[in-house]
Each structure stands twice: as C-alpha cells, then as structure tokens.
Image: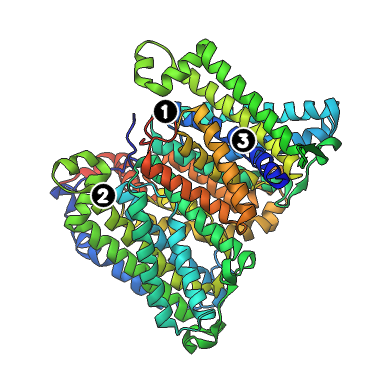
Amino acid sequence: MTEVKSPEVPAPPAAVPAELTSERGRWHRVRPYLPLVVLLVAAILPYSTVQLPGIFEGPLNSPGTLQLLAICLIFGGLAAGYDLLFGRTGMLSFGHALYFAAGVYGTDVLITKAGLPLWQAALLTISGGTILAALLGAVALRTVGIAFAMVTLAFAQVGAILVARDFGGLTGGEEGLPLDVSGLPAGLVGVTNTVNLYWLALAYLALVVFVVHRVSGSATGRVLAGLRDDERRIGVLGLDPYRYKLVAFTLAGGLAASGGVVYCLIVGGASPHITSSELTLSLLVMVVLGGPGTRWGPVLGGILYMYLDHRLTAFGASDAVDSLPAVLSRPLSQPLFVLGTIFILAVYFFPGGLASLTPRLTLLRRSLTGGSSRRS
Amino acid sequence: MDTVILLTLTGLGLAALYFLVASGLSLVFGLADVLNFAHGLFLGVGAYATWWAAGNLPGAGSDGFGFVLAVAFGVAAGTLVAVLVELVLIRPLYSRTIEQVLVTVGLSLAGVALLQATWGADARPFPRPEWTRGVTGILGAQVPNGGLLLVIAAVLVLGALLAFLQWTRYGLVIRAGVENREMVTALGIDVRKAFTLVFAIGGAAAALAGALGGVYFGTVSPGQGSSLLIFAFIVVVIGGMGSVVGSAYAAVAVGLLQQFVNYYGTSGLGDICVVGLLAVVLLLRPQGIAGKVATA
C-alpha cells in the first residue's frame, strides 16, 4: 500500500558556487534582512495615499483597502500555521478550520454573551483553542494517513453542526453573531481605526512566521521533517512519532485560534461559513499554491488567495467580463471556479507552488543568457 | 410503534442515499487509493442533468416513463463526467496519492462553482412524479414514497454490484485489486482499466443518488453533494474502505442512528452521534467493520 507522503517539495536551490557570487555578494549580505524590510514597508503602508487603480478600489490608507489587506494577512498567517502540519510534518488535516472557528466564536461569545474584557476573552480563547487541539489531536493521531484526514474532517463537521444548530442560543446559528463592541478598547472600534486592526493582523502574521521558522529550525523541527519523509525511521531512532505529531498539531491549533481572535475583531463578528470544511480546503489550496514546506510560500499563497477571492468577485462584475458571452462570463464571475481551476493547473504544472518559481526562473534565465553568466 | 416504524423506514431512506454515494467512494478508495472529494460533484451533475432533462429532453418528463428517461440521462451524465475526470485528471497522477486528492479537492471547488454559475446558488424545485409526493401506509406508519423509492434503488444497486463483483471477470479483477494491487499488476492485468470502470460505477451510483435525492428532498441545489459527501466519507470509514457490504451495513447504522437521535434528542444531536460512532469505531477497529486497514 502506498504511504501517504507530502507532495515532493523541490530541494532548496543548490548553493551558488563561489565564482558566481562575486557580483551578488552584497545582495547575499542584505538578504537575511529582507523580511524585516518587507515588514517595515508593510507597517508604514497605511501612511501612503497611493492609488492603485484596478488593484484596490480606494487609496491604500482607505479603511476598505486596509480591511481587505488585514484579512489577507490573517490568512497568510493561517496558511503558514497550517503548513506546519501539511508541508513540514506531512499530516493531511481536513479540520483546521475548527480551531480557527473556535478562536473566532470563542472571542465573540465571551465578549458579546459573557461580557468579558477583550484581553481576558482573548487569553481564554487562545488557551481553550489550544487545549481543544490537544484533546482532539490526541484522539485523531491514533490514526494515520487518509483515516486521519477523515477523522479531522468529521471533528470539524461537529463544530460546524454545533455552530449552525445554535445550541443554547450562543452562536446565533445561520445568521452569525455580531461582535458587541461597547466593551472593546476605543482604538479597535470604528471605521477610522481600521489601521490599528491592520497592524494587529500584521503582528499576527509576523508572530506565526517567527514561530513556524523557529520551530522548523529547532531539533523538534528536524524530527517533524523526518516524520514527513519516513515515519518508521523516526520510530527506529527511538523517538515517539505520536508525541511529536501531537506537539505540531497542538501548536498549529493554538496559532489558528489566535488568528481567529484577530479575525473576529477585524470582521466584527462571526458567521457560520468559517466553520465549513470549505475553509480547510481553501487553506490547503493556499499552501499548495504557495509551496508547502517553504518559509514564504504559504504566506504568499494565503495572501494571494484571499486577495483573489475578494477581488475576483469585483472582477466578475466588471464590464470586461460582462461583455463576454454568457458561457464565459458566468463561470468567471465565480471566484471559486477560477481559483479551483488555477489550483488544479498548479498541481500539474507547478508542484512546488509559487516558491518553486524563483529557482525555476533562475534556471531559465541562466540557460537563456548561456555562457555570459558563467564568467569567473 | 408507528413512530418507530416511520423513523426506521425514513432512516433507511437516508441510509440508502448514503450507501449510493459511499459504495462508489469506497470502491474507488479501496482500489485506487484516491480519496475522491469530487464525488459530490458527480452527485450534483446527476441531479442537475435529471432536472434539465425533465424540462428540455424530448420524451423525458416529470412523470411515468419520461421520468425514467430523465433519470437515465442524469445517470449517464454522471457516469460520463466521472470517466472523463478519471481519464483526464486522475490517470496522469497514477500512484501519487496526495496530488490526486488535491486535484479532486480543486475539482470539487471549481465544479460546484460551475454548477452555481450555470444554474444559480438557490435551490430549484425538482420535477418529480406525482406519486412520490404521497405516502404509503406500512404497519400503520405513513411513509413518504420518495424514501421508499430510494431504499428500493439502493437494494437493487447493492444486489447488482455484488453480482458484478462476484460473477464477472472485471469484478474479480477489482476484488483482487482491492486486496493487493501490486500482485494483480504483476500478473499482467492492466489495473488502470479497472480504475476507470470503478470511477464509472461510482459516478453512476452517485448520479442516481443525486436524481433520487432530488425526488426525496424535492429540490436541487449546487451544495447538496458536498454536505452529503461528509457523511458518505464517515460511512466509508466505518464500513471499511473497499468493502461494498461494509458500506451497506455502515450506511444503515449511520442513517438509523441519525434519524432516531435527531427525533428523540435535539435536532443536530444525531449528526454529532454519528461522528462519535466514527471515533469509537476508529479507536476500537481502525480497519472498519469489514475492510482492509485504513492506513494509506
């Protein structure tokens, strides 16, 4: 029987031989600081009033654009957290939406129904979400491979049912539960303060990337990568695969729950669609589009997916699409159709996702320029 | 007593629906190791094709022989889509399990969106013969005819499938392939033909489930398939992957449990009990009621 393995992650680009680096040496010295520069640019972005017609509707600092960006950043973080399971440990979980939804609904219910202040609600929700992930993970991880995927899917389905059936009138059922903003800090409420939420989302993304990076660089991370490649070998080395997988599952669940807290503040409430298995499927799409097991791939994939998901709706309603014959314009107005098609194509033609494009393009450029790049 | 009989028979109707979806899923998974998320799409295609045929296809209609023709058209459409999916999308990724799952995930997203784009997101009234709206008195219980139709169809499909697997050459290849694919390949038999066949069978059963489910619920909507699919997955895991009989037992267990608990407990509790049953089965007997170990 075939073992379930993570898709083949392309090897990191081979170390560039010394003779090629002479002119690019400076670039290599700057490169480790590039993430910080990007973070800085992202942080001062709200001060810009640049109009990007076609890309965003308003100027960059308009609340609508900032909210869209904040949601994109949250999903970048979520995808990076999910990649800890899928890309780095090789666990195919179909229930990651559950922990995100636990974060969103936990915050919402604790603030709106129980009247707790934000910091208490956030703390309780994140610890609750982490404990939930640990408990369910302890059961689900007794199975492996596809059975694990099924069990996590089923657990997430329970979450979706609980939310939709509105037990005890807590979740608001199909309508969702708008957040009661009266008890929140003034800086997080109102359209004019969207910029603070944007920074919060950016901080969340930075935190997730930092945590995932540190974990995968640590000894634990190497065991996780070992589990992905060959679980039996880790067992032979005397390490307990179950325990390491549970650690990764719990950590990813906790990160997703914290993302839920921030998402709840940005959107101002909770709606049942975030509990659906479709959300987990889109997380999977984000990670695969970006490049599983890479540092920036899932983040980029998440941001791009959410951006397209929002903007394709507008694109579908635009004149350019409307003037097409109905056979074309109707499917194009469905973001999921476009994204699903891109996803299928990506699985076939770019198995490593966006992150694999850079080495490929480098190869292409080098072969095109031929001998000229081989100067020494 | 009436209530118990009614609940049993409607539960069996639900079980029949689950079985029609799960039997194909189970065979596909058992033979080809593909967790087919696009199975809900086959169901949707079957339902919409039947709905379309009843209104537009000459000779087909919503009653009598015309309805049979419409359902046949729906089943043919579902089979065709399933075969195309296998040939065009699944086959090039032979033995790369995760990529196959990913492709079916993408297909389920894009396909449902396509149905939605073509016929709208709202549920449409389904054309159904007059007699399926009525009820039949069985032992004092008034049972809806649509449910009975589903049960009869599922029993027929189960019988036909078992006969096919038991007494035909391709049935033998499929059974052997579920047991040990490498050995069948080593004996010089092209298992991939069996893959296509299994996809066709699964697509046909799912399309039939779509058409008859439309009769049962009275409406058809793009999302119908994916909500049924999750319970079909649960049925497959409980029944044991690759086992048609196991799927039948599990479907009955899940359908009855869901119907009874939803009636006597709070609505929605039954769905949760089903997941509880899944957890218990997986912890006690990971290979399911009857099937190979569900590890890959």
Q: Chain of mark 3?
A: B
Marks 2 and 1: same chain? no
Helix, strand or loop for disc 3: helix
> Quick check: B290 left or right of A311?
left
Q: Is residue A237 visible?
A: yes
Relative to the observer, which residue lies in front, B77 or A302? Answer: B77
Q: Residue B189 in the image: x percent, y percent?
A: 42, 12
Marks 3 and 2: same chain? no
Q: Residue B50 in the image: x percent, y percent?
A: 75, 34
Q: Gap in Å between the C-alphas at discs 2 and 1?
A: 30 Å
Residue picked out by circle 3: B42
The furthest residue to the bottom: A186
> Quick check: A289 left or right of B171?
left
Q: Which amino acid type is shown beneath numbered disc 1?
A: Tyr
Quarter of the image that includes the C terminus of chain B: top left
Give the foreground label among 2 and 1: 2
Going from N to C along the chain, the mark reached first, 1 or 3, is: 3
Residue picked out by circle 1: B94
Q: Is residue A47 visible?
A: no
| Pointer 2 local density, CA inside 10 Å: few below 14, some 14–19, many at least 20 | some
Give the foreground label among 1 and 3: 3
Relative to the observer, which residue lies in front, B263 or A258? Answer: B263
Residue picked out by circle 2: A242
Say above or below: B236 vs A34: above
Q: Gap in Å between the C-alphas at discs 1 and 3?
A: 21 Å
Give the foreground label among 3 and 2: 2
In contact (CB < 8 Å): disc 2 and disc 1: no
Helix, strand or loop for disc 2: helix
> Quick check: B221 left or right of B280?
right
Q: Which amino acid type is shown beneath numbered disc 3?
A: Phe
